[in-house]
Image (cartoon, rainbow, N blue to C red):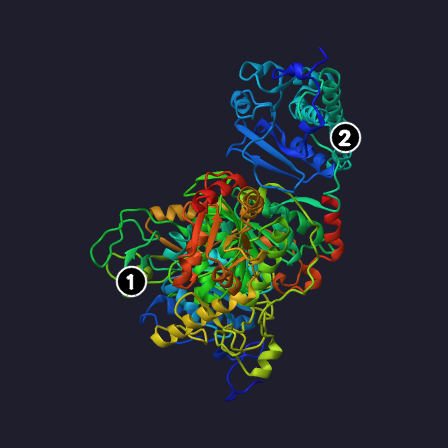
Amino acid sequence: MATATPTPKVNHIGLPIIEYRGGKSTLCAGCGHNAISERIIDAMFEMGVQPERVMKMSGIGCSSKSPAYFMSRSHAFNSVHGRMAAVSTGAILANHTMKTIGVSGDGDTASIGMGGFVHLLRRNLPMIYIIEDNGVYGLTKGQFSATADLGSKLKTGVINDLPAIDTCALAIQLGATFVGRSFSGDKKQLLSMLKAAIAHKGTVMLDVISPCVTFNDHEGSTKSYKFMQENDEPINEIGFVASFDDIEVDYDSGQVYDVEMHDGSSLRLRKLLEDYDPTDKANAVRTLMESQANDEILTGVFYINTEQPTFIDLLNVVDEPLGTLPESLTRPPKSALDSLMANLS
Amino acid sequence: MATGDLALGQEQGALSAQQRVINDFSINVATVNGSGSQSANSVLLKSIFGMGVPVSGKNLFPSNIAGLPTWFIIRASKDGYVARKRTAEVLVALNPDTARQDALDLPSGGVAIYEENLNLKQYREDLVFYPVPFDKITASICPEAKLRKLVKNMVYVGVAAQVLQIDLGVVESGLRKQFAKKVKVFELNFGAVKAGFDYAQQNFTKQDPYFIERMDQTAGKIIIDGNAACGMGAVFAGVTVVAWYPITPSTSVVEATTDLLKKFRVTPEGKATFAVIQAEDELAAIGMVLGAGWAGARSMTATSGPGVSLMAEFSGLGYFAEIPGVIFDVQRTGPSTGMPTRTSQADLLSTAFLSHGDTKHIVLLPGSVKECFELGYAAFDLAERIQTPVFVLTDLDMGMNNWMSEPFEYPTTPLDRGKVLSAADLERLGGFARYRDVDGDAIGWRTLPGNPHPKAAYFTRGSGHNDAAAYTEKPAEYVAVMERLARKFENARKLVPGPVTVKNGTSKIGFLAYGTTDFALRESLDQIKKAYDVDADYMRIRAYPFAHEIHDFVASHERVYVVEQNRDAQLESLLKFDLPADQVVKLRSILHYNGLPIDAQSITEEFATKEGL
């Protein structure tokens, strides 16, 4: 039997968790985004992802700063406002062998970045797309975003009179193949969801409610810690067994959905909502719409599809990264040019 | 009736040898767009080429799918002039809506080949008329009614070939090549050509002076459009990621690129060594280009003015975060939507300074289809060497029209992938600072995602950063980065393609131009020499930032005419930014911006006026 030793705990690729940490956060103390960064660190550590094999992408905003606060050993691109989807698409086309995680915000995604976001979803681009969702624009001091709930109130007393965009319903409809919602304060659920996300091969869209302690964490806000603690309705309990954890999965049909992931891991969803089937697209969207009508914030994995080909599959590209293919594979030989010239003369 | 119907001077009889106009005239084929006239036009052009006569073609088409007037103007020029000429001497009138005006536009003594029921004789008396019952001829050789519209155009090729005395065998071999292995299609089309040819032979006596006679000026040459040449440049640069959004007149750059990639870049196992993605808009297209460039790919997009406008913010990111990428801009007329199917050179300033803040870009300016290929592949080397977006500016005239050229030559140097550190390099160095100028060339070393070294990663951002890529708002650190970027751009003067000295003699007068203006300017300089005995010098610019030779050229002349195709003298303005104050006063402008390609006569006239000749 193992006994306690003073050496730090390492994961299955031999790295201690400190190798997954980032720079010191400059976000507000208590910001939900910091908790999400912590869970990303935990998930990547527990899954034994090599940090150098990760591309961290973001747009602009508080959320988009956060890739600086986790995994300093990973390659990072903090791009322009609303364009994380496009930049990520290009980077993944250049090197599809990398694991890509993008952190965006509700403004960055659901307003300025909506055009790119929806097209990323329909391409089922292999990446984890996280929306750190606080319903407000933080860096410009607290304007409503497009995910703010109808009737929710700003600190200044302004009431939102437009309906919220449900990014999860949208993602399911448009083609994302792993769609979930969590809460930055729910360590256990978020960690399991992120670990499963790492094992998934297509587009993972996670909307993580992340209260803004400065501008949107008060009475009347539906994206506050208090509101979430009182109104969070999980639809399933998420269990995740990584491929390298040699643990028997206890099947209990009727109560549990077990989904085999691409890398051989198992995602176990224990139903809390009666008859909820996470592979039924139409039901997933209906459930989300009904919950919105009832002012409930559902969390959990709403939809999962491990069969759908990714954009990279559709492109039928070589296994190696396109970006670093040698000249012998990318510049056609002289005979190719000669034949073209002969045809044009 | 066995006569060509010459209204003017029918009694004059056959033309004397002196009256003949040989290999020096234009043919205007007036059709309706969507009528499938393009392949017929191309066959006629290639037939003249096949006769060994220098030829160029210009498609003046509307922004429309079907039903609006289109003109295809073919210029045969024994002297090798390929610019637009103001007038065409031979008209093929197939569009009832424009036939009257098209006939009125002909010079006296011009030729009208036309559908006989258009009755063009009612408008002019001073033309040679060849009325043709196109529909009757077409019906007789094409039983299938739905194909007749397409075949009808080939009938005009036959008539024109007979009237202009183009060898039918040359037309036949051109057609055979065009339809390659589609024997039935060839037979149908050649049947139509033959029917037109025979009709003309049996019914007309040649009364006009225009002849195509065999020359040997096209042997070994190719015909290609600028967009296909750009696509070829990209493929022979080893492009791996293409992200684009359709826009006239650049779409065929990507179509050509894609065709070649499918042909040459699929492994024996059937896997692609490239990715082409049709983006949701130009914002996304350039974002994908930069994402791919950051991750190590040779990436490109092709667009036109409205797309360039949308690419502004990202272009600034590319400049500031120092990410390679190639943007082909096939210029069309603006502002705004402008005239999407008309040409211009009006994006020079907007691309050179695209984006807010102190942003500057490298802009390459090909002046021929051969240079579309050469500067096309050079752009990828420069983008990776200098770590910045590179714009390649052509225009609709270059991009969508057919041009004669010497065959393209295979690149003689290997791909220059720029300054990229490997894991072994990092092991040896013990780390790196992304934006530190360690070599004195103002270019830092970069790493690519996928580099497995623990010190390979850095944080790319468009926000203020220091030389180690860390966020900064410190004035000195910001200034240091900006000054290095300025030095890098200054150094680029020596890295970009230098100007071509077309002529530099002893004249006090110099000309500067770029791109398609070259075609008209060369012809104009000959006109100026002939008419005014002024033997002016000429330097063709091929890139921004301007090479030092351009400064020297201005310095060594008293007056320098900058000829360009936009209203605001954009090239002249850019030169004014660059030249010392005492040199700026030497610049004079000759501008052309009506949407049609510039012609030689316009330059000559404007020059004469400005010089008081």
Mark closer to the observer (2, 1): 2
Q: Position of residue B466 (x, y in %)?
A: 42, 75
Residue B43 drawn above or below residue B490? above
Front residue (pair B23, B354) = B23
Chain to which mark 2 belongs: B
Please tell me which residue is depicted at 65% across the width and 56% down the height of the picture: A317
Front residue (pair B115, A217) = B115
Q: Which mark is residue A121?
A: none
The reply to whether residue B161 is visible in this rendering is yes
Which quarter of the figure is the N terminus of chain A placed in? Answer: bottom right
Q: Is residue B7 left or right of residue B598?
A: right
Distance of label 2 from label 1 (alpha carbons): 88 Å
The reply to whether residue A123 is visible in this rendering is no
Residue A324 drawn above or below residue A302? below
Where is residue A139, by image quadrant? Answer: bottom left
Front residue (pair B473, A253) = B473
Q: Which residue is mark 1?
A: A226
Q: Secondary structure at mark 1?
A: helix
